[in-house]
Image: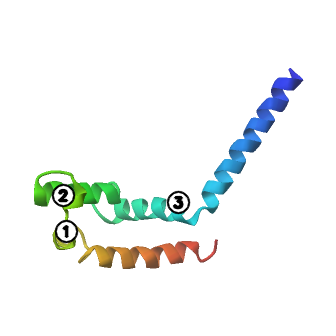
Amino acid sequence: MVIKQIAEIERIKKLDEQWDSIRKDINFAEELAINDFVKENTRFESIVDLYNQACLHTLGHQDISDLTRKNLDAFISENSEFKSMIDLKVKFDDFFKKINKGA
């Protein structure tokens, strides 16, 4: 019984270490934050959903490699409060800096 408890404690320690490394990964945190930002400020579930919907709407398929910046910007301005992808990114960057100021 004691061995099982020790093994469980060690397993929990490893999981905690893994979660700590994920929390400290700024790129991962930014990826999660931009998806939250897009979900809260548009009708799309994530940045990938936005790209996929733009493709589907403008090109009739979901191969984002065919999507041009002009098509993406037009889709964003028609379907959100943002004027373009750059506008969305700038507003996201401001938001991300604010939420990480105290961290």
Q: Which residue is mark 1?
A: 68
Instruction: Residue type at mark 3: give it.
Output: Phe
Residue 54 vs 73, above or below: the answer is above
- Does residue 87 lie above or below 47 as drawn? below
Quarter of the figure that contains the N terminus:
top right
Few, some or many residues within 10 Å of mark 1 (<14, 14–19, 20+): few
Q: Please name whichever residue, 65 or 34, is drawn nearer the observer in this view of the structure.
A: 65
Q: Residue at x 37, y 74 (%)?
A: 89
Residue 28: numbered disc: 3
Q: Position of residue 26 (x, y in %)?
A: 57, 66
User: In the rendered structure, which amino acid carries the disc numbered 2?
Assistant: Cys
Badge 2 marks a residue whose secondary structure is helix
Which of disc 2 and disc 3 is earlier in sequence? Answer: 3
Mark 1 and mark 2 lie on one chain; the one further toward the N terminus is 2
Residue indicated by mark 2? 55
Q: Secondary structure at mark 3?
A: helix
For image coordinates 69% across by 43% down, the residue present is 15
